[in-house]
Image: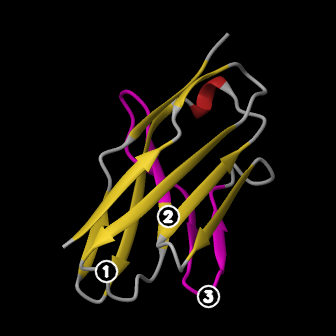
Amino acid sequence: QVKLVESGGGLVQPGGSLRLSCAASGSIFRLNTMGWYRQAPGKERELVATISSAGYTNYADSVKGRFTISRDNAKNTVYLQMNSLKPEDTAVYYCNANNYYGDYWGQGTQVTVSS
């Protein structure tokens, strides 16, 4: 079993920045794609960004140019640098990872963008 623990969420003003981290632990076996998803109140969970084990990235159109995903394979950790935050970025952000044995989710971290 793989455990994912997110950190770095919080309250930030519009235009501000936050950096989310997600550390994987447990029975890790060659984590493949890692990524971030988010869910705003009353909306479905949506993809924010993903990164493959080789470093290939994919972003939702709504965050391109503002968010950057990266990972440290030695630490089994994925990061999400969020700049120029907007009120519509407010959501619970979930970390996701997968390997041969399954697909795993973190418990989520709240990001609130408000003045």
Against 48, residue 1 (above or below) is below
* Residue at 29% in and 46% down: 107
* Residue at 39% in and 88% down: 30
Please give left or right for residue 61 compared with residue 112 in the image: right
Identify residue type, mark 3: Ala
Task: Write the start and end of the magenta stretch as one range.
Answer: 36-60
In the rendered image, residue 73 lying in the magenta stretch gets the answer no
Q: Secondary structure at mark 2?
A: strand
Name the residue tied to disc 1: 28
Image depth: mark 2 or mark 1 in front: 1
10 Å crowding of disc 2: few (<14), some (14-19), many (20+)? many
* Residue at 65% in and 73% down: 57
In the rendered image, residue 49 lying in the magenta stretch gets the answer yes
Q: Give yes or no for contact between labels 1 and 3 (Cβ–Cβ under 8 Å).
A: no
User: Is residue 22 among what the camera can see?
Assistant: yes
Residue 77, given in percent of the width and then of the height, sits at 50, 66
10 Å crowding of disc 1: few (<14), some (14-19), many (20+)? some
